[in-house]
Amino acid sequence: MFSIAALGLQPAIAYNSNSVLPTWANSATIYEVNIRQYTEAGTFKAFEAHLPRLQKLGVKILWLMPIHPISELNRKGSLGSPYAVANYKGINPEFGNEADFKSLVTKAHALGFKVILDWVANHSGWDNPWTANKSWYHTDGSGNIVPPNNDWLDVAWLNYKNQDMRRAMIEAMAYWVKTFDVDGFRADVAAGVPTDFWKAANTQLQAIKPLFMLAEDQSSTSLLDDAFIANYNWELKDLVKAIADGSKDRTVFDAVAANQVFNYPTRSFPMNFITNHDENSWSGTEFERLGNAVSAMAALTFTYPGMPLIYSGQEVGNTKRLAFFEKDFIPGLTVANSTTAFYTKLVSLKSKNASLWNNSTAKLVPTLGNNNSVIAYSRTLGSNKVLTVINVTDKTQKVTLNLSKLSASYYLFSTGNLAKLKTTLTLTLKPWQYEIYSSKKA
């Protein structure tokens, strides 16, 4: 078992940080919206009808996948990738118009949501007007604009050595904040863009209003020091897959958790997930990848340090891989089921227990046990405590845990009943069974 204390290390500390967490995001769960595939119509207006349902789910931040017009030149499939932006200030006519988008944001705000946009700063579509300025893009020896790599042939690679392009990019981002009152950005391929650009952009954008900034990255802590408050927890995503496969156990989990405590700058955190648009379309649904471990791993993402993500359809147990370049449709979104109740309860658990909040200083502390097939950890903030215990195998496991610093009364996630825990706890857990003990009832 590994711990920061055992290694004699201290958690990373941010310096000259421009990274901020708006107060409204303290306890928030983020929900990714795939407008194209969300409804049969695939429009803002059709999605609006789901806002009351998502309000009941309890999610706070709505992250919209790119809403911009999609380039036709070199596009993949018949509809193209939403990440091939044809106009940074435009709206995809398939989704609606400016009035429709304003209506969506206004109604979302009225129901207590915040809205963030997916922003593609590393590359644009090939028929974006910016391509008229070749110096705004990377070019080959013949002066031709090039894609970022040999796979992303539908997009053109932007050149951040060009100061005019940088200014235009920040101005375009500010346009959406000022004109439509959006509340932040998820930055696609964030590490592909220089950190000093993000620092400048964040400084100017935060001067307009407090924004939530999420980086699609987990490689550069400088992005968290200088611009973003959160990034992707790809490491945890890969680990839960390995746990579900049976190739990793509690010892590896404890080591990863200790390492992340050390590496994340103060006040920053990861976004935890078991699925998203990329995972669903390219790697398979969470049920394909995690099998019977889905519920246990979802519970882990809600109690592990960071902000949990729910992707479109995850809350109803969607088992369908969604097409990426074509029109598709998520079935069953209008009918609440046991999966909906499960995620609603997880969101409530997070929002009611301050030790699980995104701004919490409550680090994950491994709970000593005698079985490495059972993951156990706690998070404590003052009098608020949460203990998570998970059988990470497909076999029944028995474990005895040392609760010397956790003995107290807790609500059981599974039943809602109150239980008093003493200095030791012995459990027999069925395959993939888990239990969460919390100071506040979910």
Image (spheres, rainbow, N blue to C red):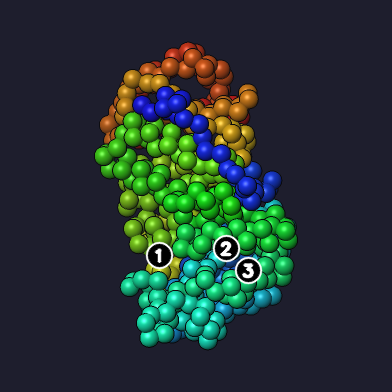
Earlier sequence position, callout 3 versus callout 2: 3
**Quadrant housing the N terminus:** top left
Tell me residue 326's x, y (percent).
41, 74
**Alpha-carbon distance for marks 1 and 2?**
33 Å
Image height of 201 relative to 291, above or below: below
Q: Which mark is residue 23?
A: none
What residue is pinned by disc 3?
170
* Location of residue 143 by image quarter: bottom left
Three-letter code, disc 1:
Leu
Element at label 3: helix
Report, in whole angstroms, how far the alpha carbon at label 1 lies from the one at label 3: 32 Å
Q: Is residue 103 left or right of residue 416?
A: right
- Residue at the (54%, 42%) spot, across then down: 265
Q: Which mark is residue 322?
A: 1
Q: Is residue 211 above or below residue 261?
A: below
Q: Residues within 10 Å of mark 2 (few under 14, many from 20)?
A: some
Callout 1 environment at 10 Å: few (<14), some (14 to 19), or many (20+)?
many
Q: Along the polypeptide, which appears first: circle 1 or circle 2?
A: 2
